[in-house]
Amino acid sequence: MVVSRLQYIRRRLLLAVPIIFFIIALNFLLIQIAPGDAADVLAGEAGSATPEYMDQLRRKFGLDQPIYVQLLTYVSNVATFDLGFSFRHNKPVSELILSRLGPTLLLMVPVLLISVSMGILLGAIAARYLNRWQDKTISTVVVLTYATPVFWAGLMLIVLFSVKLGWFPTSGMEKIAAFHTGLARIIDIAHHMVLPVITLTLFYIALYTRLMRASVIEQNTMDYVTTARSKGLGEKRVLWGHILRNACLPVLTMAGIQAGALLGGAVVVETVFSWPGLGLLAYESLFARDLNLLLGIFFISACLVVLVNLAVDLLYASLDPRIELK
Amino acid sequence: MLAQKIQKFMSLVFTFGLVMLMTQQVSAQAVPKASPTVTPQQGGTLVMVVQPEPPTLASFLSTAAPVGQVATKVYEGLLEYDFKLTPQPGLAKSWKVSPDGKMITFKLQENVTFHDGKPFTSADVKFTVLDVLKKSHPRGMNTFRALEAIDTPDQYTAVFKMSEPAPYMLMALSGYESPMLPKHIFETGDVTKHPNADLPIGTGPFKFVEWQKGQFMRFDKNPSYWKKGRPYLDRIVTRFIADGSTRAAVLETQEAHIAGFNAVLPVDVRRLEKLNHIGMTTSGYEMQSPIVELDFNTRTKPFDDVKVRQAVAYAIDRKFVVDNIWFGFGRPATGPINSNFKANGLYTADVKNYNVTNGIEMANKLLDEAGYKRGAEGVRFEITHDITPYGEEWRRFGEYVAQQLGKIGIKVTLRQEDVPAWLRRVYTNYDYQLTNNWIQTLADPVIGVHRLYHSGSIRQGTVFVNGTRWSTPETDNLMNQAAVETNPKNRAKIYHDLQKRIVDASPIVFVHELEFVTVHNKKVQNFLVSPLGLYSTFDQAWLQK
Amino acid sequence: MRDIFRRFARNIPAVFGLVILVLVMGAAFFAPTIYPQGPFEMVGRPFLEPLTDYLLGTDQLGRDLGVGLLYGARVTLQIGLISTLIAIFLGLTIGGTAGYFGGWIDTLLMRITEIFQTIPFFLFAILLVAILKPTLGSVIFAIAVVSWPPMARLVRSEFLSIRNREFVQACIVMGMGHWQIIFKHVLPNTLSPIIVTGSLMVATAILIESGLSFLGLTDPNVMSWGFIIGSGRSVLRTAWWVCAMPGIAILLTVMAINLVGEGLNDALNPRLKNI
């Protein structure tokens, strides 16, 4: 049964609720398997702690409750958008996430935009000049950049451009001791963004270029293309006018998937560049057994993915009229 | 009278010992001193790299090294210490110990204010020590156990009354170990979950301004600091950088000025020390005295047998470990007490020596004697070796141990977990056979060493205490005696006996004495003014323009 | 069949890739025969540069890097192949069924896929490995679990697209059974993106493994290329070869896999080559 767009959206959002609940429950239960809890971590860091003190901590964190009670408490809180309190950082989880969401977006949005657009462009060019030098060059370079481990690329870029040449800062999001404001701050942050963005983009461009290239090649065999050519349309017109629209679809699908992984996918780059993003925060919260924070990050990420997937499916349907929204 | 004489004598011994110690330190620079003709310059922002990011600023609840490095800029203690380990005036401008050693009268500095403008008085001292440190500080409960009451006859006098003499207590009154807190802030509410835990208000030369988690903390100059003319710096920013190579890089590019506690990895230190603008020192850690060890589970097979434990102790080439895994930073250890204590005579090297050239041969012999003959593929038995989760060097160390033990017929499977899992396993569940570890033995064996070997320290669920669960009545006795013995010669004798017995029984393999390194830009002057190193307030530190 | 081989053989980059792969697999296979003592043996002075006593130098504990690479090939390939195979199988089954049959089956399977896809994959991999403790098995499991959703979605969107084509509609009208349609018509037409994506996935698996190793989440008893890179990370500036060599090994292997994958693609779909 074909439904209207609005109904479809509503339905998808409703369906998302059990999914998100499931994700939270899954991660919550997985973490329970891991030995040790937040009290252990704090005790370890304090250098010593008596069992009484640790019991005190556990009561404070609510860790002394049975598991199902903890889970239900958490879920009911989340339903009212209360993501809980991070006992490790002594702040509400939502505040922590918001403060690190900005830097993450600052990194991932440019990466996504640049890599998708460049990927589509390069992929189309490679496919257009199939097996000629443009294709061979692009394909070779792309495979090389894809195959390079991201953290190694990052470290090498730091060694070359920061330490040896001094063109860019080694790490961080802004110059700490300067405390810039306004335009100076924007420029400072942009300056710090360059290397981490390049590091990540190299990887993703390769991904999208390859996919686009394969997709365009496939489209070339389609009947409608043969038709267009036999109608005497120029190669350029065929490519840009017809093929591109359809060839983009797998790329957009993949981009949608990657956008969903936006929040956690940059852990490695964030580690190398000390970029204060959510990936690093989640990583730390796992090893600190900071349950609320970790679950909170997964929750936000889940919501983001749901929204992005919905957007991609809508886009897909609008680009390919033969696909029905069910 | 006697107590004062003892104190003076001990200071002399310390002085002599430390002078000897410092001239012996191999790859340490001379303590950086500003030449007398150079006057400190005002101004500048000092950027310090701290690793890992401290979980809290409540140094009255946590003694972790990162906390110590940052909180000490805001809070101060009653005393400071010079390199001879002699107590110096801090917030207490003078003090008198009674003849029987059971009463100490502190006269406080006058007209000292907290960062919120309220005055610092003896009421704050009484509150801090009795209500906070003695109750909730991880070591405070032990340090102040003999303290019964504090009288405050006037706002600048605090009289400590003890049930018995406690000579070690005067060594524990630094701003790191016993920070003075504002009573008017912390008396309301529960100190263990206080909103001001991370919004510290102290008397120190720097005020806390902000903390961006995952990035930095900022401390600005306290304009009404009680030491006139200080601090020289305008601001201190502590930066948190997850990646080791990046930490080295920021010092290289001069974005940061100083990093201690091996925030810069030893391998990078070796590289950085060749640069003109970089200086390095292993000084400033004399009150930590950490030892790297291999801990056995002495209650289960195979390490319940002393011969097997000794065999493992023989199999380790300590020099190789220091040179290749810690890049030369360290000294082979001989026993439970760090050789830093050679200075006051408590240390002895006259113990069973496992660091011999024919170690593998000795180990094989012992294992044969213990009844573990070689079987198929030359394997005597298998064990799992846990790796302490604090960094890369421990993995390399684990891999090394696995190879060495393979040579004596022990098949090793390595296991790596994260901090909470490892702590649970070792100190709560006792579910391990062999693990590597490192422990700070601190400023006095009573504080740092007893907790590892005394039967009273076998406390399930408490971390960094006697996790091997080894003890003997004789060694317990020796430790009890040493805690109250005031005659330094007798005390030394007791500790020598203790070291011999512990090393013989080998509940722990003593591998090496860890050396921490502080890497700094040569522009930074006067940051190292006491053995507390980076745990001092930095009120004298200044940046050369 | 013969034609496919011939077309492949004429594709020079693909042959080049195949040669590399054969070498890598040979290294993996013969490593224990040539160096039975294993890669953890400390044989020389630490940090010897390449081309001195040992061809590829030694690492921090004096272990022969060359031996490490050979043994590493074994483990890295194992991890990459097994996890990918599991992931492809899961993705094909779930995505194909969803895309073809549609309706509530599609909805249900896609909800499940969405669950796994909604979790940030690298974080989830870290979570799984950390919880299950870093061992060979947990790493393979974690990589497989985070890799299948993209494959499933891709397969589904392809199946969805093709299912709505005229010729498939015609088959249905003709009364052809579902399995016949799937295996004879739908699957072959989706093979191209599946092969490309699948080959990329082995590469991704190897890269995920190196990323996990970089963060310290490897089996400490098993030497993979990622493990060697992880161990060399802190000495990158002084002993660059410890990171560089396995990095190059990964690069070559990943590249080779891609070239072979594409070669297969071109060989299976000859029409596409001659535009």
Image (cartoon, coloured by chain):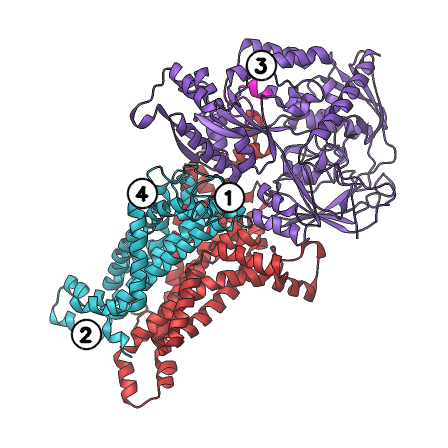
Chain colours: A red, B purple, C cyan
For mark 4, does the 10 Å Cα neighbourhood hold few (<14), some (14 to 19), or many (20 or more) residues? few
Tag 2 secondary structure: helix
Identify the mark nearer the N-term, 2 or 4: 4
Q: Is residue B260 left or right of residue A304?
A: right
Give the residue displayed 32% in from the left and 38% down from the top: C36
Which numbered disc covers residue C167? 2
Disc 1 target residue: C47
Q: Are marks 3 and 2 in contact (CB under 8 Å)?
A: no
Q: Nearer the viewer, mark 1 or mark 2?
A: 1
Disc 4 target residue: C34
Tag 4 secondary structure: helix
How far, Cα to Cα, is label 1 from label 2?
A: 64 Å
The chain carrying label 1 is: C
How far, Cα to Cα, is label 4 from label 1?
A: 23 Å
Q: Nearer the viewer, mark 1 or mark 3?
A: 1
Give, as a three-letter code, the residue at label 4.
Answer: Ile
Q: Nearer the viewer, residue A181 or C29?
A: C29
